[in-house]
Image (cartoon, rainbow, N blue to C red):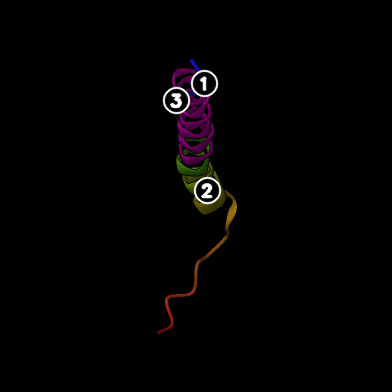
Amino acid sequence: MAPIQNLLHQQSTLTAFVYTFGFLFFSYLCLIPLLALFKPKPKLSA
C-alpha cells in the first residue's frame, strides 16, 4: 500500500501547487490593469 499512498501524496501536492499557481496567475492578471491604471504615463522607450 506504500506506492499507492505515495501516489496519493504526490497527487495532493500537485493539486495544491496547481491551485497556488492558478491563484498567483489570476491575481497577477488582476494587478496588471491596476498598475497600468495607477501609472501616470508609461514611457515607451526601446
> Where, by quadrant of the figure, is residue 4 drawn?
top left
The magenta span reads 3-25
Residue at the disc numbered 3: 7
For the residues carrying marks 2 and 3, which lies nearer the camera in this image?
3
Toward the viewer: 39 or 4? 4
Q: In percent of the image, x 52 and y 65: which residue is there?
A: 41
Residue at the disc numbered 2: 37
Q: In percent of the image, x 49 and y 28: which residue is there?
A: 19
Mark 2, secondary structure of its residue: helix
Residue at the disc numbered 1: 2
Q: CA distance from mark 1 to mark 2?
A: 53 Å
The mark nearer the N terminus, 1 or 2, is: 1
Q: Please tell me whether residue 7 is drawn above or below residue 36 in the rendered image.
A: above
Please identify the residue farthest to the top as the structure is shown.
Answer: 1
Query: Dot 3: within a 10 Å radius of its alpha carbon, few (fewer than 14), some, or many (20 or more) residues?
Result: few
Q: Main secondary structure of the magenta part?
A: helix
